[in-house]
Image: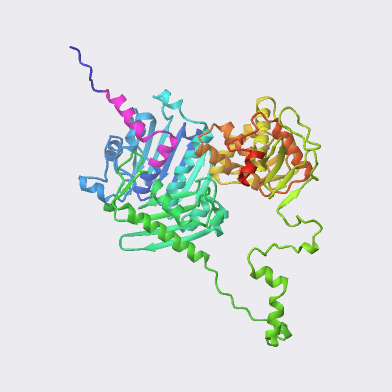
Amino acid sequence: MSNTIHVLPDHIANQIAAGEVIQRPASAVKELLENAVDAAATEIHLIVNDAGKALVQVIDNGKGMGAADARLCFERHATSKINQIEDLFRIRTMGFRGEALASIAAVAQVEIKTRTKDSDVGSQLEVANRRVESESPVAVPIGTSIAMKNLFFNVPARRNFLKSNAAEMRHILEEFTRVALAFPEIRFLLTANHQQLYHLEPGSLKQRVVQLLGNPYQSKLVAVQEQTDYLTIRGFVGKPETAKKTRGDQYFFVNNRFIKSAYLHHAVMSAYQELIAGDQFPSYVLFIDLDPRQVDVNVHPTKQEIKFEDEKIVYAFVQAAIRHALAQFSITPTLDFDLDAGIQSLSAIQQPFTEDKKQATAGSRLFSGFTQKNQAHLIDRSAADKPWAGLPIREVTPPEEQQTSLIGASLDLENTPLTQLLQTYIIFPIKDGYRLIHQQRAHERIRYEKLMQADAQKPMASQRSMFPATLELNAADASILEELLPPLRELGYQIEPFGKNTYVVHGTPADLESGEEQHTIDWLLEQYKQLAQELKLPQKESLIRALARQQAIRSGEYLTEREIRELVQELLHCQQGNVSPDGHPTYLEFRKEQLNKLFGY
């Protein structure tokens, strides 16, 4: 009988193992940055070309390595962090398994230059397929430079699975941000394609947060600081008004290691309960410090998923700490003003409030409006021109005795009364009933189909701006916008790069009003990220849905008679006018028999 089980060759086994650690350029960025931190560097420079596909290089001024260690560091499970199994439960460094450099060397061409303070000359090695191709002495500063070139050169099938440069760069920026946030005392630099994206000077955590997440956070952060014998929590949460529709700026660190934890995220969300809408997410950068023996970080190849010995205690502590911080933020200080002398001398202040004056005041309509229930919007019928004055229904055209049935082919709305209700809905009469149209969802459907049609046939017309607007974005959002520029041009936006993370808007779709371009693009990117992350939609679909939502009229927006008629007319011409792009109904239909049942006959 022939044997069916055999041992894989080393080069295949190494590439399979490397796939668990190095999935894309950003994976190498994470590992190399963490190694530099572990080397006690005070300055770390990340250099990437072609979104890391051609080059990922990390230069640090840390301890460096001798010639023997420089050779040994590329062996699998070669580490200086662990000597016995008990050391796994005392880990305070970022790396410890000895897999990072071995994995990188298995799928890329690597060059390392390193020197310790005790050596006058350093070592240079070139490694490919985990084999040392060359080794020589070299004059280099104290520290280490590791360059990873041509990722997946020996596994072309895996290289084909990499995303666009903009998408891969976005992942690199995420990893850079996580490490830079965790160590604000270290100077970090990031250069991409010979352009410097970040130069982060050492400073406080708040300074680093603002440097990385954007200047708007300068006045929007609430400090969190609680300490017990079991654990400490520190960091910042965003004020409720900074909550977004996406999970963008949310960072948890345990013993300075970035982690992902749906459990702890739920603790944060519960702390914000009743402070933000249910579909919004708060921003936070939170650090939990506790005894390493209380946490197991060795449960996932990327070390981003961990286990707590007592997760319920951590959950309760996170929730309580954030609630305490938000409660302190919400407390309004007592203000003590000196009263103007002229006001002090008024008769209303000087003279006593007699019983007669009290009764006269209590009988006034003004007093009733403030003290009785449901009186705040009371309108005196004697002063009203119509018996329905004051009701939250706006009648656009007078009701006709004969209402036109629009079930079927008739699309003539000229003789049909349309009513805007609560500045959110439109009452649209039909035979034996009416349709209650949700104006925002209906307009989203209209805009979506127009954008889809424009994408399929020809680019949309654009109107040039007399005074082009300049946009300033953070590096992550700039990376997204860079990726979206070609499809945005097809949809009527004329946006051009203008230096580091800066863009100029020369034109917008012809049927949109110009102005507030910064807010418009920020909002568009936020919607795009939400759709792309949560629904996993293709780029073009996510962009068109985001544009449709951005360009649609809002609930609570007043519409003129003409606007109402145009909206209903366009909805009736939609191919799928009954649902919005995200699947919600654009209208509900009510029949006479349903209404009769509601009234009991």
Q: Which residues are magenta?
A: 8-31
The number of numbered badges drawn on the structure is 0
Q: Depth check: 405 or 19 in front?
A: 405
Residue 191, image x, y percentages: 51, 42
Residue 307, image x, y percentages: 31, 47
Left or right: 565 as drawn, with respect to 12: right
Q: Please, which residue is most extreme toward the left here?
A: 1
The answer to whether residue 205 is magenta is no
Q: Is residue 152 above or below residue 70?
A: above
* Residue 434 seen in this snapshot: yes
Q: Depth check: 441 or 40 in front?
A: 441
Q: Quadrant of residue 109?
A: top left
Which secondary structure type mostly characterizes the magenta part of the structure?
helix
Q: Residue at x 43, y 50 (%)?
A: 265
Residue 314, image x, y percentages: 35, 55
Name the quadrant of the C terminus. top right
Q: Depth check: 7 or 540 in front?
A: 540
Q: Quadrant of residue 132?
A: top left
Q: Residue at x 58, y 75 (%)?
A: 335
Q: Quadrant of residue 466?
A: top right
The answer to whether residue 9 is magenta is yes
Residue 183, image x, y percentages: 41, 52
* Coloring applied to the structure: rainbow
* Residue 590 seen in this snapshot: no
Q: Please, which residue is most extreme toward the top here?
A: 1
Name the quadrant of the N terminus. top left
Q: Residue at x 68, y 29 (%)?
A: 454
Left or right: 164 as drawn, with respect to 380: left
